[in-house]
Amino acid sequence: MNEMKETLTRKVKSEIKERLERFDLREEIDEKGNIQLWLKLYNLKDILHIAQLVKDFGGRCIIISAYKKNNHSVLVYHFDIDGMILNVELELFDNKVYSITPILNSANWAEREFKEMYEIELIGHPNPARLFLDESIAEGVLREYMPLSQAMNGAATCCMWEKIENERLKDEN
Amino acid sequence: MKTKIPIGPFHIGLEEPIYFKITLNGETVDEVDMINGFVHRGIEYLAMQKNFFQNLILTERVCALCSNNHPFTYVMAVEKIAGIKISKRAEYLRVIADEVKRIASHMFNLSMLAHLIGFHSLMTQTMEAREIVQDIKESIWGNRMDMSANTLSGVKYDLNESQIEYILKSLDKVEKEADELIDIYFNNKLVKARTVNVGVLPKEDAIRLGVAGPTARGSGVNNDVRLKAPYAAYDELKPEFIIEEGGDVYSRMRVRWREVKDSIRLLREALNNLPEGPIVTQKRPHIPAGEAVTRSEAPRGELIYYLKTNGSQKPERMRWRVPTYMNWEALRVMIPGNKLSDVAVIFNSIDPCISCTER
């Protein structure tokens, strides 16, 4: 089993070297012999090459994690290739990224979620619709600080009653 | 003539809120659209405001049925960053808690299948058999859902000889009941009429969409994390390679029952070979800066955690993805072409957890 994993890792690493020009790559093996690759990309378009590579190996996108670093967003893609995880880090300095959903359908929801939570612009997603948040909530909400009183919309005070009364009066008029 | 029918967000046939917009052509579903977000609670954001011990409590409350897998996968990520090695006994105890949860979760889903096809005596019988597993949880962990079994660097519970004997005796009872139930679920005409060739997910679509758990294994795709990337004691306690090829509701049901049987086998093996050792190795471990990805096989499939730390007491970023997140899109393949009355049965067959998915 471990021998098969090592052979697969070797093949994936050699393909990465073949298809990309500039990158950092490190390998991590846990005590059970599970292998994870950590890849850092410097060219935005390279994520499309990696998605194609994962597809060629019969892999899938497990999830994409987004977080904020200084003033820009960072994406960490997590792919699975027959039990091996390939983690790919990509920093977005202009908050735009190419969608990999046309290549790997399994990335569909993950891309839509970081779009609405971090206001990251997706280039070429087939269905960039909202996933969880209502249209009335601004995109990028996870990056914002929101006081509890505002989040509750005054639900614990007379503000809520006043709001309902105002809306009722508006309707009547 | 085409008709549009809304189901949800709150509906008697749905366990949790979700909104289906169904286009019907006569009695047959032509197209289905789904709208989510009714139970989005921002738990990921909340997790970044809590310290590493508080997050044990929080992650266990993301969902009820796979509540053990959340802290289990989370602690593995923290331990990986901190370089903490846990004892063999703790690894076995983690597996025992998880397999008990798997049996209870699968049997709940299977009883819901019986309920949705109108076979109420079968539903009652399945729930009664599941009660034996619920009793194990309540007796050993003190709770029927949230077992609080995991902690950083080990587990919070231990088993003595009499407790092991009690669990083994209870497993004999569950197995006897399960064998009787399996015969009905696999062979009964009513069950087969409502499940065979219903909600088919072809293998190529299962691979394309990256579905997980029994949903994948019912379509001939095995990505059981316990086998593909072993963790805890799963390198020693090997689960069976369970796969069905039909891709329909019947196949997914068969996978779950076969897994119930295999979990009973795994539990016996773990309980009879429980190694000696401490249950916790470090009381208050320091968590340095780093990042880690860990995953486990929850009852519904692969659960993955991404954790990034910066040396403080709280995660810098924590992200998780539950199996339903991937299985959801498969409903767009499974539902069209089926009767409207089968929608709830198909929906149940992915064992959906909306509370987990939306967080």
Image (cartoon, coloured by chain):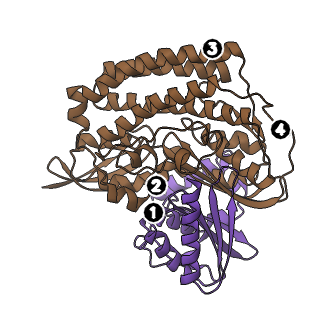
Chain colours: A purple, B brown
Q: Find the distance from the CA under tag 3 to the CA under tag 4.
A: 26 Å
Q: Secondary structure at mark 2?
A: helix
Name the residue located 67 percent from the left edge and 44 percent from the top edge: A156
Observer able to see residue B280: yes
Q: Secondary structure at mark 1?
A: helix
Q: Which residue is mark 1?
A: A106
Q: Which residue is mark 2?
A: B326
Q: Earlier in the sequence, mark 3 or mark 2?
A: 3
Q: Secondary structure at mark 4?
A: loop
Name the residue located 72 percent from the left edge and 29 percent from the top edge: B275
Quadrant for residue A3, please give it: bottom right
Mark in front: 3 vs 2: 3
Q: Disc 2 marks which amino acid?
A: Met
Label 1–label 4 contact, CB within 8 A:
no
Q: Which residue is mark 3?
A: B165
Question: Which image quarter is the N terminus of chain B in?
Answer: bottom left
Q: Find the distance from the CA under tag 3 to the CA under tag 1.
A: 45 Å
Q: Are marks 2 and 1 on the same chain?
A: no
- Left or right: A102 with respect to B346? right
Q: Find the distance from the CA under tag 2 to the CA under tag 1.
A: 7 Å
Chain at tag 4? B
Q: Which residue is mark 4?
A: B281
Q: Are marks 3 and 4 on the same chain?
A: yes
Chain at tag 1? A
